[in-house]
Amino acid sequence: MAVTHFDIFEIPRSVDLEAGALEKKFHALSLAFHPDRQPANDASARRIAADKTASLNEAYRVLKDPARRAFYLLKLLGVDLEREDSPLQKQLPLHFLEEVIEQREALDDAKKAKDLKRVSAMADQVRAARATALVAGTAALRQAMGAEPDASAVSTATKEMARLKYFDRFLEEVEAIEEQVGTA
């Protein structure tokens, strides 16, 4: 069985983590694993410490962010939304996909018009939808990971987190437009 990010921090798998406690544990483990704390003449120990530090940094990066943590928990449940070819992403409702296409076209129009005010307003709407999807996705994950795992909750979490990926891509595009138009 592979070591999970939760195992590295010696904490149970959970949607909800206390950020302060996680950060404190991260700093303590960073000190303990740091390659400079290994004997200078022991290359093997230093290499192992460097590998542990890299794993620790990755685990912290994932666990400290609620969305990344949710994607990771889904992956631990057997749902990998990080893969672009994931068939699960194709299960999104048609009306949502149509909405995404319309939003992209409107964003493209605003970009061509160099209308940053409109781009910003669209981004605000997508941020709100993203927040709603994250709340719904994490709530479903809590249910999926409960004492009695619920397959329908995994399905709901999957759909909400797949929506979140679309929202994140949209917001990345907004940032690129803001930089491009802002420097033009």
Image (cartoon, rainbow, N blue to C red):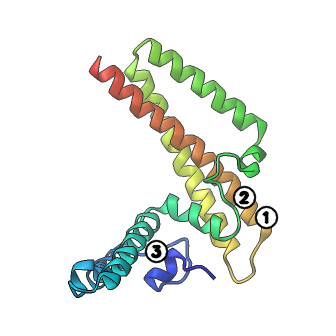
Q: Secondary structure at mark 2?
A: helix
Numbered label tally: 3
- Identified by mark 2, the residue type is Thr
83 above or below 58? above
58 above or below 13? above
Residue 86, x across and y down, in percent: 71, 50
Q: Which mark is residue 47?
A: none
User: Which quarter of the figure is the N terminus placed in?
Assistant: bottom right
Of the pair 90 and 2, the residue shown nearer to us: 2
Q: To which residue does mark 3 refer?
A: 17
- Identified by mark 3, the residue type is Leu
Q: Which mark is residue 156?
A: 2
- Of callouts 3 and 1, the N-terminal one: 3
- Identified by mark 1, the residue type is Ser
Name, please, the residue furthest toward the top.
113
For label 2, the crowd category at 10 Å Cα-Cα, with few meaning under 14, some 14 to 19 and many 20 or more, is some
Q: To which residue does mark 1 refer?
A: 152
As measured in the structure, the alpha-carbon distance from the residue carrying label 2 to the one carrying label 3 is 21 Å
- Looking at the image, residue 53 sits to the left or right of residue 83; the answer is left
Q: Secondary structure at mark 1?
A: helix
For label 3, the crowd category at 10 Å Cα-Cα, with few meaning under 14, some 14 to 19 and many 20 or more, is some
Image marks 2 and 3: residues in contact by CB distance under 8 Å: no
User: Which quarter of the figure is the C terminus placed in?
Assistant: top left
Of the pair 156 and 27, the residue shown nearer to us: 27
As measured in the structure, the alpha-carbon distance from the residue carrying label 3 to the one carrying label 1 is 24 Å
- Looking at the image, residue 21 sits to the left or right of residue 160; the answer is left
As measured in the structure, the alpha-carbon distance from the residue carrying label 1 to the one carrying label 2 is 6 Å
Image marks 1 and 2: residues in contact by CB distance under 8 Å: yes
182 above or below 16? above
Q: Secondary structure at mark 3?
A: loop
For label 1, the crowd category at 10 Å Cα-Cα, with few meaning under 14, some 14 to 19 and many 20 or more, is few
